[in-house]
Image (tube, helix red, strand yellow):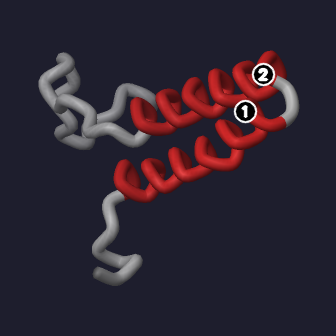
Amino acid sequence: MSLETLQPRHAAAVGLLALIPLIVYAITDSVFAGGVSVLNTCLIYGSLYLAMSPVETSHGHHGDGSSTLG
């Protein structure tokens, strides 16, 4: 699989690999700081996943290229 065939949503999933060192940090050093870091990483991943998800095309715009701006 090359990078050209990789879908953006799958590429964003690589961000979940950041959870591994964060969980180790939470276990070994600071549970509170590690937990907050894990939560923030999950929120960022969720936002990227939603931002890169497909958009439905039936939302009222015809997309015929006509413009009312002249």
Q: Is residue 70 visible?
A: no
Q: Nearer the viewer, residue 15 or 53?
A: 15
Which image quarter holds the N terminus?
A: bottom left
Give residue 22's position: percent from left, percent from top: 70, 40
Up the image or down, 23 lies above or below 30; here it is: below
Q: Secondary structure at mark 1?
A: helix
Please name the amino acid that badge 2 sits on: Val
Please name the amino acid that badge 1 sits on: Ile
The residue where tag 2 is placed is: 31
Among the 4 quarters of the image, the one containing residue 34: top right
The local crowd at label 1, few if under 14, some if 14 to 19, many if 20 or more residues have their Cα within 10 Å, is few
Q: What distance separates the C-alpha of mark 2 from that of mark 1?
A: 6 Å
Badge 2 vs badge 1, beta-carbon distance below 8 Å: yes
The residue where tag 1 is placed is: 27
What residue appears at the point 55 percent right and 49 percent down from the top-left corner?
15
Which image quarter holds the C terminus?
A: top left
Along the horizontal axis of the image, is 48 left or right of 66? right
Determine the residue located farthest toward the front in the rendered image: 28
Give residue 19's position: percent from left, percent from top: 60, 42
The local crowd at label 2, few if under 14, some if 14 to 19, many if 20 or more residues have their Cα within 10 Å, is some
What residue appears at the point 85 percent right and 26 percent down from the top-left corner?
30
